[in-house]
Image (spheres, grey):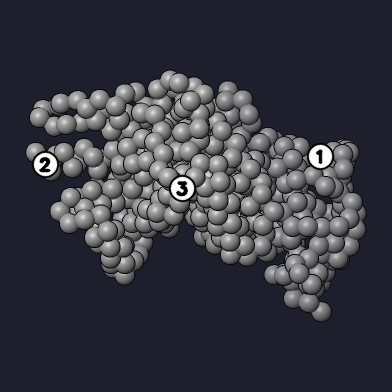
Amino acid sequence: MTMLLSVDGLTAGYGGARALDGVSLGIEAGETVALLGANGAGKSTLLKALLGLVPARGALRFDGADLGGLATEARVRRGIGYVPEGRRVFPGMSVRDNLEVAGLPAARDRARDVERVFALFPDLAAKSGEHAWRLSGGQQQMLSLGRALMGRPRLLLLDEPSLGLSPKLADEVFAAIGRIAAAGTAVLLAEQSAVRALRVAPRAILLRLGRVVGDGPVASLSEEALRDVFFGG
Amino acid sequence: MAALQLLVNGVALGAAYALVALGFVLVLNATSAVNFAQGDLVMAGGLLAVALAPLIPLPGIVLLPVVLVLMAVLGLLLALAAYLPLRRRPPVSVFISTIAVGIILQNGAAILFGPEPRAAPPLFGDDTLRIAGLAVPEQSLAIVAVAALLIGAQQWVFARTQLGRRLRATAQDPEMARACGVPVTAMILVTFAIGAACAGAAGLLLANRYFVTPTAGGDLILKAYIAVTVGGWGSVPGAVVGALLIALFEIGVSSVLSYPMALGALYLTLLAILVFRPQGLFGEAVRRRG
Protein backbone atom coordinates (compact mmCIF):
# COMPACT_ATOMS: atom_id res chain seq x y z
CA MET A 1 0.00 0.00 0.00
CA THR A 2 1.11 3.60 -0.57
CA MET A 3 1.02 6.33 2.05
CA LEU A 4 -1.94 8.61 1.30
CA LEU A 5 -1.74 11.01 4.23
CA SER A 6 1.25 11.77 6.40
CA VAL A 7 1.16 14.18 9.29
CA ASP A 8 4.25 15.22 11.22
CA GLY A 9 4.32 17.41 14.33
CA LEU A 10 0.89 18.93 13.85
CA THR A 11 0.04 21.61 16.41
CA ALA A 12 -3.21 23.55 16.55
CA GLY A 13 -5.26 25.46 19.07
CA TYR A 14 -7.95 27.97 19.80
CA GLY A 15 -6.72 31.28 21.14
CA GLY A 16 -4.12 30.44 23.77
CA ALA A 17 -5.33 26.88 24.35
CA ARG A 18 -3.43 24.13 22.53
CA ALA A 19 -5.77 21.41 21.23
CA LEU A 20 -3.19 19.39 19.27
CA ASP A 21 0.38 19.02 20.42
CA GLY A 22 2.83 17.57 17.90
CA VAL A 23 0.53 14.96 16.36
CA SER A 24 2.19 12.62 13.86
CA LEU A 25 0.41 9.85 11.96
CA GLY A 26 0.09 8.23 8.58
CA ILE A 27 -2.79 6.68 6.66
CA GLU A 28 -2.35 4.39 3.69
CA ALA A 29 -4.55 4.36 0.61
CA GLY A 30 -7.75 2.42 1.23
CA GLU A 31 -7.06 2.01 4.96
CA THR A 32 -9.72 2.50 7.64
CA VAL A 33 -8.41 3.96 10.88
CA ALA A 34 -10.35 4.71 14.06
CA LEU A 35 -9.38 7.87 15.93
CA LEU A 36 -10.32 7.28 19.54
CA GLY A 37 -10.30 9.57 22.51
CA ALA A 38 -12.44 11.17 25.17
CA ASN A 39 -14.28 14.46 24.78
CA GLY A 40 -11.71 17.21 24.38
CA ALA A 41 -8.92 14.87 23.28
CA GLY A 42 -8.57 16.83 20.04
CA LYS A 43 -10.24 14.44 17.58
CA SER A 44 -12.46 17.05 15.92
CA THR A 45 -9.63 19.60 15.90
CA LEU A 46 -7.36 17.10 14.19
CA LEU A 47 -9.90 16.45 11.43
CA LYS A 48 -10.50 20.19 11.00
CA ALA A 49 -6.78 20.88 10.90
CA LEU A 50 -6.31 18.24 8.19
CA LEU A 51 -8.94 20.03 6.15
CA GLY A 52 -7.58 23.50 6.90
CA LEU A 53 -10.64 24.62 8.87
CA VAL A 54 -8.52 25.55 11.87
CA PRO A 55 -5.04 27.05 11.61
CA ALA A 56 -2.30 24.54 12.33
CA ARG A 57 1.48 24.19 12.19
CA GLY A 58 3.37 21.10 11.11
CA ALA A 59 3.99 19.05 7.98
CA LEU A 60 0.97 17.72 6.09
CA ARG A 61 1.32 15.67 2.91
CA PHE A 62 -1.50 14.13 0.90
CA ASP A 63 -0.69 11.75 -1.92
CA GLY A 64 2.87 13.05 -1.88
CA ALA A 65 1.91 16.72 -2.21
CA ASP A 66 2.34 19.33 0.51
CA LEU A 67 -1.01 20.54 1.84
CA GLY A 68 0.45 23.40 3.88
CA GLY A 69 -0.91 26.76 2.80
CA LEU A 70 -3.68 25.22 0.70
CA ALA A 71 -7.20 26.54 1.34
CA THR A 72 -9.87 24.11 2.53
CA GLU A 73 -11.62 24.00 -0.83
CA ALA A 74 -8.33 23.13 -2.57
CA ARG A 75 -7.75 20.27 -0.11
CA VAL A 76 -11.24 18.98 -0.84
CA ARG A 77 -10.56 19.12 -4.57
CA ARG A 78 -7.39 17.06 -4.00
CA GLY A 79 -9.53 14.25 -2.62
CA ILE A 80 -10.32 14.79 1.07
CA GLY A 81 -13.98 14.47 2.07
CA TYR A 82 -15.37 15.58 5.42
CA VAL A 83 -18.43 14.59 7.42
CA PRO A 84 -18.69 16.98 10.38
CA GLU A 85 -20.00 16.34 13.83
CA GLY A 86 -23.71 17.18 13.95
CA ARG A 87 -24.20 16.53 10.18
CA ARG A 88 -24.45 20.20 9.18
CA VAL A 89 -26.47 19.62 6.04
CA PHE A 90 -27.65 22.77 4.26
CA PRO A 91 -31.14 22.89 5.78
CA GLY A 92 -32.85 25.15 3.25
CA MET A 93 -31.64 23.17 0.25
CA SER A 94 -33.16 20.02 -1.19
CA VAL A 95 -31.50 16.64 -0.70
CA ARG A 96 -30.39 16.62 -4.34
CA ASP A 97 -29.00 20.16 -4.12
CA ASN A 98 -27.11 19.24 -0.92
CA LEU A 99 -25.42 16.51 -2.90
CA GLU A 100 -24.87 18.44 -6.11
CA VAL A 101 -23.29 21.44 -4.40
CA ALA A 102 -20.39 19.23 -3.33
CA GLY A 103 -20.09 17.54 -6.70
CA LEU A 104 -17.66 17.72 -9.59
CA PRO A 105 -17.85 20.65 -12.04
CA ALA A 106 -19.33 18.66 -14.96
CA ALA A 107 -23.11 18.23 -14.67
CA ARG A 108 -22.96 14.73 -16.19
CA ASP A 109 -20.43 13.58 -13.55
CA ARG A 110 -22.56 15.09 -10.80
CA ALA A 111 -25.71 13.34 -12.04
CA ARG A 112 -23.88 10.01 -12.10
CA ASP A 113 -22.50 10.54 -8.60
CA VAL A 114 -25.92 11.51 -7.21
CA GLU A 115 -27.28 8.21 -8.54
CA ARG A 116 -24.36 6.38 -6.93
CA VAL A 117 -25.17 8.02 -3.56
CA PHE A 118 -28.86 7.18 -3.98
CA ALA A 119 -27.90 3.55 -4.63
CA LEU A 120 -25.90 3.57 -1.39
CA PHE A 121 -28.66 5.33 0.57
CA PRO A 122 -32.03 4.44 -1.00
CA ASP A 123 -33.86 6.46 1.70
CA LEU A 124 -32.37 9.64 0.24
CA ALA A 125 -33.53 8.81 -3.28
CA ALA A 126 -37.12 8.77 -2.07
CA LYS A 127 -36.69 12.25 -0.58
CA SER A 128 -34.51 13.85 -3.23
CA GLY A 129 -36.73 16.93 -3.64
CA GLU A 130 -37.35 17.55 0.07
CA HIS A 131 -35.60 20.20 2.10
CA ALA A 132 -32.80 18.71 4.21
CA TRP A 133 -34.28 20.08 7.47
CA ARG A 134 -37.25 17.75 7.00
CA LEU A 135 -35.08 14.62 7.19
CA SER A 136 -34.66 12.53 10.33
CA GLY A 137 -31.30 12.58 12.13
CA GLY A 138 -30.26 9.30 10.53
CA GLN A 139 -31.23 10.48 7.06
CA GLN A 140 -29.33 13.73 7.61
CA GLN A 141 -26.27 11.70 8.60
CA MET A 142 -26.60 9.68 5.41
CA LEU A 143 -26.97 12.89 3.43
CA SER A 144 -23.87 14.29 5.07
CA LEU A 145 -21.98 11.10 4.17
CA GLY A 146 -23.34 11.12 0.64
CA ARG A 147 -22.41 14.78 0.24
CA ALA A 148 -18.83 14.02 1.24
CA LEU A 149 -18.72 11.25 -1.37
CA MET A 150 -19.79 13.61 -4.16
CA GLY A 151 -16.25 14.97 -4.49
CA ARG A 152 -14.99 11.38 -5.09
CA PRO A 153 -12.66 11.54 -2.08
CA ARG A 154 -9.72 9.20 -1.59
CA LEU A 155 -9.74 9.97 2.12
CA LEU A 156 -12.90 10.46 4.14
CA LEU A 157 -12.74 12.24 7.50
CA LEU A 158 -15.70 11.27 9.69
CA ASP A 159 -16.40 13.14 12.91
CA GLU A 160 -18.64 11.30 15.40
CA PRO A 161 -21.04 9.86 12.82
CA SER A 162 -23.09 8.01 15.47
CA LEU A 163 -23.61 11.06 17.68
CA GLY A 164 -27.28 11.66 18.49
CA LEU A 165 -28.52 8.62 16.58
CA SER A 166 -30.53 5.70 17.93
CA PRO A 167 -28.56 2.44 18.12
CA LYS A 168 -30.44 1.09 15.08
CA LEU A 169 -29.70 4.17 12.97
CA ALA A 170 -26.09 4.24 14.18
CA ASP A 171 -25.73 0.62 13.02
CA GLU A 172 -27.12 1.56 9.61
CA VAL A 173 -24.68 4.47 9.31
CA PHE A 174 -21.76 2.26 10.29
CA ALA A 175 -22.85 -0.39 7.80
CA ALA A 176 -22.70 2.33 5.11
CA ILE A 177 -19.24 3.38 6.31
CA GLY A 178 -18.16 -0.25 6.02
CA ARG A 179 -19.42 -0.33 2.40
CA ILE A 180 -17.61 2.93 1.57
CA ALA A 181 -14.37 1.60 3.06
CA ALA A 182 -14.78 -1.71 1.24
CA ALA A 183 -15.04 0.21 -2.03
CA GLY A 184 -11.48 1.47 -1.48
CA THR A 185 -11.89 4.90 0.12
CA ALA A 186 -9.52 5.49 3.04
CA VAL A 187 -11.40 6.48 6.20
CA LEU A 188 -10.26 8.29 9.32
CA LEU A 189 -13.07 7.82 11.79
CA ALA A 190 -13.22 9.94 14.96
CA GLU A 191 -15.66 8.30 17.30
CA GLN A 192 -16.45 8.10 20.99
CA SER A 193 -18.16 4.77 20.60
CA ALA A 194 -15.02 2.63 20.48
CA VAL A 195 -16.96 -0.61 20.10
CA ARG A 196 -18.63 0.56 16.88
CA ALA A 197 -15.49 2.18 15.50
CA LEU A 198 -13.33 -0.87 16.08
CA ARG A 199 -15.90 -3.02 14.29
CA VAL A 200 -15.09 -1.29 10.98
CA ALA A 201 -11.49 -0.17 11.57
CA PRO A 202 -8.62 -2.69 11.76
CA ARG A 203 -6.29 0.02 13.10
CA ALA A 204 -6.74 2.69 15.76
CA ILE A 205 -5.00 5.86 16.81
CA LEU A 206 -5.45 6.85 20.44
CA LEU A 207 -5.53 10.54 21.24
CA ARG A 208 -5.30 12.04 24.69
CA LEU A 209 -5.08 15.75 25.52
CA GLY A 210 -3.98 16.55 21.96
CA ARG A 211 -1.24 13.90 21.76
CA VAL A 212 -1.06 10.50 20.07
CA VAL A 213 -0.66 7.97 22.88
CA GLY A 214 -1.18 4.82 20.87
CA ASP A 215 -1.24 3.75 17.21
CA GLY A 216 -1.48 0.26 15.82
CA PRO A 217 -3.64 -2.68 14.79
CA VAL A 218 -6.69 -3.04 16.98
CA ALA A 219 -5.55 -6.47 18.16
CA SER A 220 -2.36 -4.94 19.53
CA LEU A 221 -4.14 -2.33 21.67
CA SER A 222 -4.60 -3.38 25.24
CA GLU A 223 -7.88 -2.88 27.03
CA GLU A 224 -5.92 -0.87 29.57
CA ALA A 225 -4.65 1.55 26.91
CA LEU A 226 -8.20 2.09 25.64
CA ARG A 227 -9.53 2.62 29.16
CA ASP A 228 -6.72 5.03 29.84
CA VAL A 229 -7.61 7.13 26.75
CA PHE A 230 -11.24 7.44 27.71
CA PHE A 231 -11.03 7.70 31.47
CA GLY A 232 -7.52 9.04 32.12
CA GLY A 233 -5.04 7.57 34.50
CA MET B 1 -60.85 52.94 -10.70
CA ALA B 2 -58.69 55.24 -8.57
CA ALA B 3 -57.70 52.27 -6.43
CA LEU B 4 -56.65 50.34 -9.53
CA GLN B 5 -54.62 53.29 -10.70
CA LEU B 6 -52.86 53.41 -7.32
CA LEU B 7 -52.29 49.66 -7.51
CA VAL B 8 -50.54 50.03 -10.88
CA ASN B 9 -48.31 52.82 -9.54
CA GLY B 10 -47.62 50.91 -6.31
CA VAL B 11 -46.65 47.71 -8.10
CA ALA B 12 -44.24 49.62 -10.37
CA LEU B 13 -42.59 51.32 -7.39
CA GLY B 14 -42.62 48.06 -5.41
CA ALA B 15 -40.91 46.21 -8.27
CA ALA B 16 -37.99 48.66 -8.13
CA TYR B 17 -37.90 48.51 -4.32
CA ALA B 18 -37.86 44.72 -4.60
CA LEU B 19 -34.60 44.89 -6.53
CA VAL B 20 -33.09 47.11 -3.83
CA ALA B 21 -34.24 44.76 -1.07
CA LEU B 22 -33.13 41.69 -3.00
CA GLY B 23 -29.57 42.98 -3.33
CA PHE B 24 -29.59 43.86 0.36
CA VAL B 25 -30.82 40.45 1.52
CA LEU B 26 -28.47 38.49 -0.76
CA VAL B 27 -25.43 40.16 0.80
CA LEU B 28 -26.96 39.82 4.26
CA ASN B 29 -27.43 36.07 3.80
CA ALA B 30 -24.01 35.42 2.28
CA THR B 31 -22.03 37.43 4.80
CA SER B 32 -24.33 38.07 7.80
CA ALA B 33 -23.31 41.68 7.26
CA VAL B 34 -25.70 44.57 6.77
CA ASN B 35 -24.57 46.51 3.69
CA PHE B 36 -25.54 50.07 4.55
CA ALA B 37 -24.19 51.28 1.21
CA GLN B 38 -26.98 49.46 -0.67
CA GLY B 39 -29.14 52.60 -0.93
CA ASP B 40 -26.19 54.64 -2.16
CA LEU B 41 -25.47 51.95 -4.75
CA VAL B 42 -29.01 52.51 -6.05
CA MET B 43 -28.27 56.22 -6.27
CA ALA B 44 -24.96 55.45 -8.02
CA GLY B 45 -26.79 53.25 -10.54
CA GLY B 46 -29.27 56.03 -11.26
CA LEU B 47 -26.55 58.64 -11.73
CA LEU B 48 -24.50 56.22 -13.81
CA ALA B 49 -27.48 55.93 -16.16
CA VAL B 50 -27.75 59.74 -16.19
CA ALA B 51 -24.04 60.00 -17.07
CA LEU B 52 -24.21 57.30 -19.75
CA ALA B 53 -27.34 58.67 -21.44
CA PRO B 54 -25.53 61.39 -23.52
CA LEU B 55 -22.82 58.89 -24.47
CA ILE B 56 -25.30 56.23 -25.57
CA PRO B 57 -28.32 58.21 -26.85
CA LEU B 58 -30.60 55.18 -26.91
CA PRO B 59 -33.53 54.05 -24.73
CA GLY B 60 -32.73 53.08 -21.13
CA ILE B 61 -33.18 49.40 -21.88
CA VAL B 62 -29.96 49.54 -23.90
CA LEU B 63 -28.19 51.19 -20.98
CA LEU B 64 -29.40 48.52 -18.57
CA PRO B 65 -26.78 45.83 -19.37
CA VAL B 66 -24.01 48.45 -19.23
CA VAL B 67 -25.24 49.70 -15.85
CA LEU B 68 -25.54 46.10 -14.56
CA VAL B 69 -21.94 45.28 -15.52
CA LEU B 70 -20.42 48.52 -14.21
CA MET B 71 -22.36 48.27 -10.95
CA ALA B 72 -21.30 44.64 -10.54
CA VAL B 73 -17.70 45.85 -10.79
CA LEU B 74 -18.46 48.51 -8.17
CA GLY B 75 -19.92 45.75 -5.97
CA LEU B 76 -16.69 43.77 -6.30
CA LEU B 77 -14.66 46.82 -5.30
CA LEU B 78 -16.97 47.38 -2.33
CA ALA B 79 -16.43 43.78 -1.18
CA LEU B 80 -12.66 43.99 -1.65
CA ALA B 81 -12.36 47.32 0.17
CA ALA B 82 -15.06 47.28 2.82
CA TYR B 83 -15.90 43.64 3.54
CA LEU B 84 -13.11 41.12 2.94
CA PRO B 85 -10.40 42.88 4.99
CA LEU B 86 -12.83 43.16 7.94
CA ARG B 87 -14.80 39.93 7.81
CA ARG B 88 -13.03 38.34 10.79
CA ARG B 89 -13.50 41.49 12.88
CA PRO B 90 -16.62 42.19 14.97
CA PRO B 91 -19.74 42.78 12.79
CA VAL B 92 -19.77 46.47 13.70
CA SER B 93 -16.60 46.92 11.58
CA VAL B 94 -18.41 46.02 8.35
CA PHE B 95 -21.42 48.02 9.50
CA ILE B 96 -19.21 51.12 9.77
CA SER B 97 -17.16 50.44 6.64
CA THR B 98 -20.28 50.16 4.46
CA ILE B 99 -21.63 53.40 5.95
CA ALA B 100 -18.27 54.97 5.06
CA VAL B 101 -18.53 53.69 1.49
CA GLY B 102 -22.04 55.14 1.29
CA ILE B 103 -20.79 58.55 2.44
CA ILE B 104 -17.95 58.42 -0.11
CA LEU B 105 -20.43 57.57 -2.88
CA GLN B 106 -22.77 60.39 -1.78
CA ASN B 107 -20.02 62.99 -1.70
CA GLY B 108 -18.46 61.73 -4.91
CA ALA B 109 -21.84 62.01 -6.61
CA ALA B 110 -22.39 65.52 -5.21
CA ILE B 111 -19.01 66.64 -6.58
CA LEU B 112 -19.58 65.07 -10.00
CA PHE B 113 -23.28 65.81 -10.51
CA GLY B 114 -24.24 68.54 -8.05
CA PRO B 115 -27.18 68.38 -5.68
CA GLU B 116 -30.04 68.94 -8.12
CA PRO B 117 -32.35 66.05 -9.08
CA ARG B 118 -31.54 64.28 -12.34
CA ALA B 119 -33.65 61.99 -14.53
CA ALA B 120 -32.40 58.90 -16.35
CA PRO B 121 -33.84 58.11 -19.78
CA PRO B 122 -37.02 56.01 -19.87
CA LEU B 123 -36.57 52.30 -20.55
CA PHE B 124 -38.56 52.36 -23.80
CA GLY B 125 -40.57 55.60 -24.06
CA ASP B 126 -42.36 58.08 -21.85
CA ASP B 127 -45.85 57.86 -23.33
CA THR B 128 -48.86 57.02 -21.21
CA LEU B 129 -51.06 54.16 -22.36
CA ARG B 130 -54.84 53.97 -21.77
CA ILE B 131 -55.71 50.47 -20.62
CA ALA B 132 -59.32 49.81 -19.54
CA GLY B 133 -59.71 53.43 -18.52
CA LEU B 134 -56.46 53.47 -16.58
CA ALA B 135 -53.59 55.81 -17.41
CA VAL B 136 -50.55 53.53 -17.36
CA PRO B 137 -47.17 55.12 -18.05
CA GLU B 138 -45.03 52.98 -20.35
CA GLN B 139 -42.20 53.40 -17.86
CA SER B 140 -44.29 51.80 -15.09
CA LEU B 141 -44.97 48.75 -17.24
CA ALA B 142 -41.32 48.60 -18.23
CA ILE B 143 -40.21 48.81 -14.58
CA VAL B 144 -42.46 45.90 -13.62
CA ALA B 145 -41.40 43.83 -16.64
CA VAL B 146 -37.68 44.46 -16.20
CA ALA B 147 -37.74 43.91 -12.43
CA ALA B 148 -39.76 40.70 -12.85
CA LEU B 149 -37.31 39.51 -15.50
CA LEU B 150 -34.25 40.27 -13.37
CA ILE B 151 -35.74 38.73 -10.23
CA GLY B 152 -36.93 35.69 -12.20
CA ALA B 153 -33.52 35.25 -13.83
CA GLN B 154 -31.83 35.49 -10.48
CA GLN B 155 -34.18 32.94 -8.92
CA TRP B 156 -33.51 30.61 -11.85
CA VAL B 157 -29.75 30.91 -11.35
CA PHE B 158 -30.13 30.29 -7.61
CA ALA B 159 -32.46 27.31 -8.01
CA ARG B 160 -31.12 25.60 -11.10
CA THR B 161 -27.41 26.18 -11.50
CA GLN B 162 -24.29 25.00 -9.69
CA LEU B 163 -23.33 28.64 -9.12
CA GLY B 164 -26.71 29.19 -7.43
CA ARG B 165 -26.27 26.11 -5.22
CA ARG B 166 -22.84 27.33 -4.22
CA LEU B 167 -24.18 30.80 -3.42
CA ARG B 168 -26.98 29.31 -1.31
CA ALA B 169 -24.62 26.94 0.50
CA THR B 170 -22.30 29.87 1.26
CA ALA B 171 -25.24 31.81 2.64
CA GLN B 172 -26.40 28.93 4.85
CA ASP B 173 -23.12 27.67 6.28
CA PRO B 174 -19.90 29.18 4.90
CA GLU B 175 -17.56 26.85 6.79
CA MET B 176 -19.42 23.75 5.63
CA ALA B 177 -19.61 25.13 2.10
CA ARG B 178 -15.82 25.44 2.16
CA ALA B 179 -15.59 21.85 3.40
CA CYS B 180 -17.67 20.83 0.37
CA GLY B 181 -15.14 22.41 -1.98
CA VAL B 182 -17.04 25.65 -2.55
CA PRO B 183 -14.73 28.66 -3.09
CA VAL B 184 -16.49 30.75 -0.47
CA THR B 185 -14.54 33.98 -0.94
CA ALA B 186 -15.32 33.94 -4.67
CA MET B 187 -19.00 33.31 -3.86
CA ILE B 188 -19.03 36.30 -1.50
CA LEU B 189 -17.53 38.47 -4.25
CA VAL B 190 -20.17 37.22 -6.70
CA THR B 191 -22.89 37.99 -4.15
CA PHE B 192 -21.67 41.57 -3.70
CA ALA B 193 -21.53 41.93 -7.50
CA ILE B 194 -25.10 40.65 -7.88
CA GLY B 195 -26.30 42.85 -5.01
CA ALA B 196 -24.74 45.96 -6.55
CA ALA B 197 -26.07 45.04 -10.02
CA CYS B 198 -29.58 44.77 -8.50
CA ALA B 199 -29.09 48.18 -6.91
CA GLY B 200 -27.90 49.61 -10.24
CA ALA B 201 -30.92 48.23 -12.07
CA ALA B 202 -33.22 49.71 -9.41
CA GLY B 203 -31.42 53.04 -9.73
CA LEU B 204 -31.92 53.12 -13.48
CA LEU B 205 -35.59 52.10 -13.15
CA LEU B 206 -36.36 54.65 -10.42
CA ALA B 207 -34.33 57.56 -11.76
CA ASN B 208 -36.70 58.27 -14.62
CA ARG B 209 -40.01 58.65 -12.78
CA TYR B 210 -38.72 59.58 -9.33
CA PHE B 211 -35.45 61.36 -10.21
CA VAL B 212 -32.17 60.81 -8.41
CA THR B 213 -30.07 63.01 -6.13
CA PRO B 214 -26.77 62.22 -4.35
CA THR B 215 -28.61 61.85 -1.02
CA ALA B 216 -31.41 59.60 -2.31
CA GLY B 217 -29.72 56.47 -0.96
CA GLY B 218 -30.57 57.14 2.68
CA ASP B 219 -34.29 56.81 2.05
CA LEU B 220 -33.82 53.72 -0.10
CA ILE B 221 -31.69 51.79 2.39
CA LEU B 222 -34.40 52.40 4.98
CA LYS B 223 -37.01 51.04 2.55
CA ALA B 224 -34.85 47.96 1.89
CA TYR B 225 -34.33 47.48 5.62
CA ILE B 226 -38.08 47.75 6.26
CA ALA B 227 -38.87 45.38 3.37
CA VAL B 228 -36.49 42.76 4.76
CA THR B 229 -37.86 43.21 8.29
CA VAL B 230 -41.46 42.95 7.10
CA GLY B 231 -40.72 39.97 4.86
CA GLY B 232 -38.61 38.15 7.43
CA TRP B 233 -34.93 38.80 8.13
CA GLY B 234 -32.94 36.77 5.62
CA SER B 235 -35.86 35.57 3.50
CA VAL B 236 -35.44 36.27 -0.23
CA PRO B 237 -39.13 35.88 -1.19
CA GLY B 238 -39.98 37.81 1.98
CA ALA B 239 -37.81 40.73 0.85
CA VAL B 240 -39.58 40.89 -2.52
CA VAL B 241 -43.05 40.66 -0.99
CA GLY B 242 -42.07 43.15 1.75
CA ALA B 243 -40.88 45.63 -0.89
CA LEU B 244 -44.13 45.35 -2.84
CA LEU B 245 -46.17 45.79 0.34
CA ILE B 246 -44.34 48.91 1.49
CA ALA B 247 -44.62 50.49 -1.97
CA LEU B 248 -48.36 49.81 -2.05
CA PHE B 249 -48.68 51.15 1.49
CA GLU B 250 -46.66 54.25 0.66
CA ILE B 251 -48.61 55.03 -2.52
CA GLY B 252 -51.98 54.25 -0.90
CA VAL B 253 -51.47 56.31 2.25
CA SER B 254 -49.80 59.24 0.49
CA SER B 255 -52.74 59.48 -1.94
CA VAL B 256 -55.12 59.96 0.99
CA LEU B 257 -52.87 61.95 3.34
CA SER B 258 -49.40 63.06 2.24
CA TYR B 259 -45.99 61.50 1.57
CA PRO B 260 -44.54 62.54 4.97
CA MET B 261 -47.62 61.09 6.67
CA ALA B 262 -47.22 57.91 4.63
CA LEU B 263 -43.61 57.60 5.77
CA GLY B 264 -44.61 58.17 9.39
CA ALA B 265 -47.34 55.53 9.10
CA LEU B 266 -44.82 53.16 7.48
CA TYR B 267 -42.40 53.49 10.39
CA LEU B 268 -45.24 53.03 12.89
CA THR B 269 -46.28 49.86 11.06
CA LEU B 270 -42.68 48.69 11.15
CA LEU B 271 -42.60 49.22 14.92
CA ALA B 272 -45.85 47.28 15.27
CA ILE B 273 -44.41 44.39 13.22
CA LEU B 274 -41.25 44.36 15.32
CA VAL B 275 -43.35 44.17 18.48
CA PHE B 276 -46.08 41.75 17.40
CA ARG B 277 -44.42 39.64 14.69
CA PRO B 278 -40.67 40.18 14.92
CA GLN B 279 -39.97 37.20 12.67
CA GLY B 280 -41.77 39.01 9.82
CA LEU B 281 -44.20 37.48 7.35
CA PHE B 282 -41.83 34.67 6.32
CA GLY B 283 -40.40 33.99 9.76
CA GLU B 284 -40.05 30.25 9.25
CA ALA B 285 -37.90 30.87 6.24
CA VAL B 286 -35.65 33.07 8.35
CA ARG B 287 -35.00 30.36 10.89
CA ARG B 288 -34.02 27.91 8.18
CA ARG B 289 -32.45 30.43 5.88
CA GLY B 290 -34.54 29.09 3.01
Circles 2 and 3 in contact, beta carbons < 8 Å:
no
Amino acid type, mark 3 = Pro
Q: Which mark is residue A113?
A: none
User: Given the image, what chain letter belongs to the residue carrying mark 2?
Assistant: B
x, y percentage for residue A4?
Answer: 84, 41
User: Given the image, what chain letter belongs to the residue carrying mark 3?
Assistant: B
Residue at 55% across / 42% down in the picture?
A: B112
Residue at 36% across / 28% down in the picture?
A: B122
| Element carrying mark 1 | loop
Question: Label 3 belongs to which residue?
Answer: B115
| Residue B16 relative to residue A184: left or right | left
Q: CA distance from mark 2 to mark 3?
A: 34 Å
Circles 3 and 1 in contact, beta carbons < 8 Å:
no
Q: Which mark is nearer the camera, 1 or 2?
A: 2
| Residue B87 relative to residue A213: left or right | left
Question: Label 1 belongs to which residue?
Answer: A29
User: Given the image, what chain letter belongs to the residue carrying mark 1?
Assistant: A
Q: Is residue A77 above or below residue A86?
A: above
Residue at 65% across / 56% down in the picture?
A: B87
The number of numbered discs placed on residues in the rendered structure image is 3
Q: Which mark is nearer the camera, 2 or 3?
A: 3
The residue lying toward the viewer, choosing from A183 and A48, is A48
Amino acid type, mark 1 = Ala
